[in-house]
């Protein structure tokens, strides 16, 4: 689920990055496209387990489908 266009499906590229304010932004795009979309619920706090853990959690949610959103 994205803020800009709602649900996206298919071959996606996901990026999880730390912003200047210390929050983690989760964005995605159709692989090979230029436009990036914000995963609904993003940005979020970086968990104690780290950014990679957050990224892996997001990937698992996206792979399971059902309008995945950023974890809180």
Image (cartoon, grey):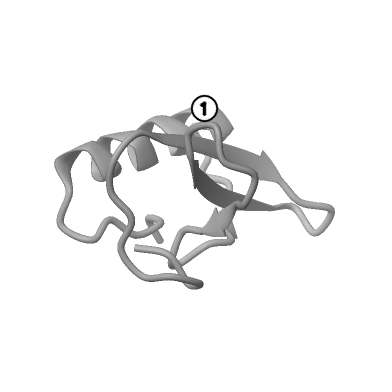
Residue located farthest toward the right when viewing the structure as drawn: 20
- Up-down relation of residue 7 to residue 20 (above or below): below
- Up-down relation of residue 9 to residue 56 (above or below): below
Given residues 34 and 26, the one toward you in this image is 34
Which residue is depicted at the point 29% across and 40% down?
10
Q: Which residue is mark 1?
A: 52
Which residue is depicted at the point 37% across and 42% down?
58
Q: Quadrant of the N terminus?
A: bottom left
Given residues 1 and 72, the one toward you in this image is 1
Q: Residues within 10 Å of mark 1 (few under 14, many from 20)?
A: few
Return the x and y of residue 42 as percentages of the image width and height. 53, 62
Return the x and y of residue 30 as percentages of the image width and height. 46, 42
Return the x and y of residue 14 as percentages of the image width and height. 49, 37
Q: Is residue 13 left or right of residue 25?
A: left
Task: Indicate the quadrant where residue 63 lies.
Answer: top left
Return the x and y of residue 26 as percentages of the image width and height. 54, 50
- Up-down relation of residue 63 to residue 52 (above or below): below
Which residue is depicted at the point 26% across and 35% down?
60
- Up-down relation of residue 59 to residue 67 (above or below): above
Q: Quadrant of the C terminus?
A: bottom left
Q: Secondary structure at mark 1?
A: helix
Total tally of numbered discs in the picture: 1
Which residue is depicted at the point 48% across and 33% down?
31
Q: Is residue 8 left or right of residue 25?
A: left
């Amino acid at each position: 689920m994205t803020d800009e266009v709602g649900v996206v499906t298919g071959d996606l590229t996901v990026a999880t990055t730390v912003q200047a304010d210390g929050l983690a932004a989760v964005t995605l795009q159709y692989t090979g496209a230029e436009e990036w979309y914000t995963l609904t619920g993003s940005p979020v706090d970086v968990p104690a387990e780290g950014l990679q853990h957050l990224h892996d959690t997001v990937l698992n949610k996206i792979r399971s489908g059902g309008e995945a959103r950023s974890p809180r």
